[in-house]
Image (spheres, rainbow, N blue to C red):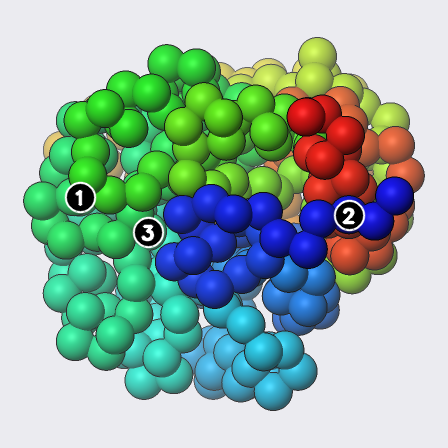
Amino acid sequence: MAISEKIDAPLSQMLGIRYPIIVAPMFLVSNVEMLVASIRAGATAAVPALNYRTIEELRQAIRQVKKEASGPLGINLIVNKSNFLYKEQLQLICEEKVDYIITSLGSPEETIREAKKNGIKVFCDVVNLEYAKKVEALGADAVIAVNSQAGGHAGPYPFEKLVPELKKACNIPVISAGGVGNGRDMRKVLEAGADGLSMGSIFIASTEAGVTDEYKQAIIDYGKDDIVMTTKLSGTPCTVIKTPYVEKIGTKQNWLERLLNKNKKLKKWMKALTFMKGMKSLKKAAFGATYKTLWCAGPSIEDVKEIKPIKGIIDQLVKEYDESK
């Protein structure tokens, strides 16, 4: 059975793509190869600006994707004070004129203002209605509704509550993020009113991902019941696989870390230090053999059974979507 050439949804129309799928930006995981493969397969993809140590490396990555694939490319930008490169990253993104920016963890006001001047769309991560209304008022082009099943920084509400609530109250597209690992669930979320989907964890076990084979195998071997929330990585609750190492170190900050995080003068620096330490630990686990296995992932890994090319993963999603009519 041939798969659908197109799944018509507002995100497909907005970005001119065949399938309303954003291959989500994943810290340390997303790379040029994944972006190119996703765009060629009929979806779109975004990469965290922080995946590149320097502004020049980010510039080269954007240009390489544009050279190798014809389709929309997004950049994920951390817009709070923990991102010391924010201003330079925003300036570069505007210069290179990517198609859209996904903002996370802070106020997107300046990002929206600068992006609009350069014809760049802005999608804002939100976890509740209050924040969704704020970013809509600021001029966001869409919200990404991060639900409780998302990988990384998950929200507090299931998609069944979050998506209908935002759809009812907002006049901009609502893209659902979290918990979708197969085409049946894809149809379910779209039919519940979502205008598109942002999907990440199932693409970690792709041939294009540059992480270790151990990380990819963990995505296959572990399931939804092995996902836990930790505050040790960035100071903000974040989902990881419950490996023996995670069980050993626990998932909550110690009393000193919590105390320093409550101090108004030290809070900004403590959060930045926690973030840097956590990201360093993730990097070691993602790219090298280590017993300190801190692997980010969401519950959708339940559906991952083998390592496949991104085109194969997207084709499988669309096939399952078609069959679930």
Relative placement, left or right, of 2 versus 121 is right
Instruction: Give the distance between the C-alpha atoms of the residues marked 3 and 1, in whole angstroms.
Output: 9 Å
Taking the spot 66% from the left edge, 82% from the top edge, the residue there is 68
Label 2 to label 3: alpha-carbon separation: 29 Å
Circle 1 residue: 135
Nearest to the observer: residue 171 or residue 206 = 171
The kind of secondary structure element at disc 2 is loop
Proximity of marks 2 and 3: CB atoms separated by less than 8 Å: no
State left or right for residue 81 relative to residue 283. left
In which quadrant of the rendered view does residue 95 lie? bottom left
Q: What element does badge 3 sit on?
A: strand
Q: Earlier in the sequence, mark 2 or mark 3?
A: 2
Q: Which residue is mark 2?
A: 3
Q: Is residue 157 visible?
A: yes
In the rendered image, is residue 210 in sight? no
Where's the N terminus, which quadrant?
A: top right
Q: Secondary structure at mark 1?
A: helix
Residue 252 or residue 68, whichever sits in front: 68
- Determine the CA span between mark 2 and mark 1: 36 Å
* Label at residue 123: 3
The amino acid sitting under disc 1 is: Val
Q: Disc 2 vs disc 3: which is toward the camera?
A: 2
Instruction: Identify the residue at the far left of this view.
Output: 137
